[in-house]
Amino acid sequence: MKAVIIEDENLIAKELQYKISTVADDVQILDVLTSLKTARKWFMQNAEPDLLFMDIQLSDGVSFELFEHFKLNCPVIFTTAYDEYAIRAFKVNGIDYLLKPVDTDELQKAIDKCRTMLQQQPKLPSSMEELMKLLQNPLPATTLYKEKFVVSVRNNWIPVLTKDIACFVRDNLNYLYTFSGEKYILDYVTLEEIEELLDPKYFYRANRQSIVHIDAIQTIKPHENQKLTLTLKAPLKMEQDVSREKAPAFKRWFER
């Protein structure tokens, strides 16, 4: 199976190539394209691959624009640091998505799904048409994201508004911390479940153990190895690390 990667972050592209080789040694990476301009030129000169890995936000535009110039029928796996494009609604047919940093198990599932699809009738055009319609007419945020979480305190249920939550932390159990410093246990198995319910405009998955609210961040300290350390505002004052691989995407999210 021949594939092309469209990704403008060199380190992320190399890491994705390595992970692909570990989970699917039959996938041959034909090329890594680092911009929309380069991608347009490549598709004018080459036949479409069996599979596409596409970052959404590139340095010179949005990768969706390729579908306005080329009729592509191959499966597409979008890779993105945050899901403001509502890709979650389209984990169907020839479209899949992976949030950065790409999880190896999720990568394997996505490739297996595309491999199965290639053995059947391609359905990408209809899926992409639906996706483009959603991008033009996005659903209201209230229908996508959770407005409050219900926590249990001494056998009583208490609502906590999502806008009052500074961060979510995984430490054997899942906890939420409010801006005022209150801590509650959440009845969710994984942070992934919680992340699905949050507006990525305000919440960021800093690492495997935490999700932080943009307004809870007091300072950001860069390290020589390009990792970042976030210090949250008082009364929390806790620190959360952002990996070197996620640092560029975090910076784009934070300074938008």
Image (tube, rainbow, N blue to C red):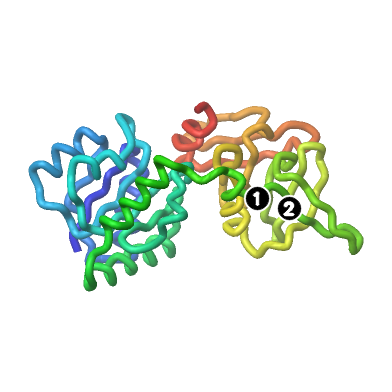
Q: Left or right: where does residue 99 sit relative to residue 66? A: right
Coordinates of residue 35 in the picture (x, y in percent): 26, 35
Name the residue type under label 1: Lys
Q: Which mark is residue 88?
A: none
Front residue of this view, candidates 78 and 240: 78
In this view of the protein, which residue sits in the foreground, 142 or 145?
142
State the image coordinates of residue 98 (x, y, percent, origin top left). Answer: 42, 54
Q: Residue furthest right?
A: 154
Q: x, y (%) of residue 173?
A: 71, 61
Q: Is residue 101 at all visible to an observer of this figure?
A: no
> Quarter-wise, where is residue 89 in the image?
bottom left
Q: Residue at x 23, y 45 (%)?
A: 32
Amino acid type at image mark 2: Phe
Instruction: Provide the residue designation for mark 1.
Output: 146
Query: Does the residue at mark 2 contact the one at mark 1 (Cβ under 8 Å)?
Result: yes
Return the mark for residue 149.
Answer: 2
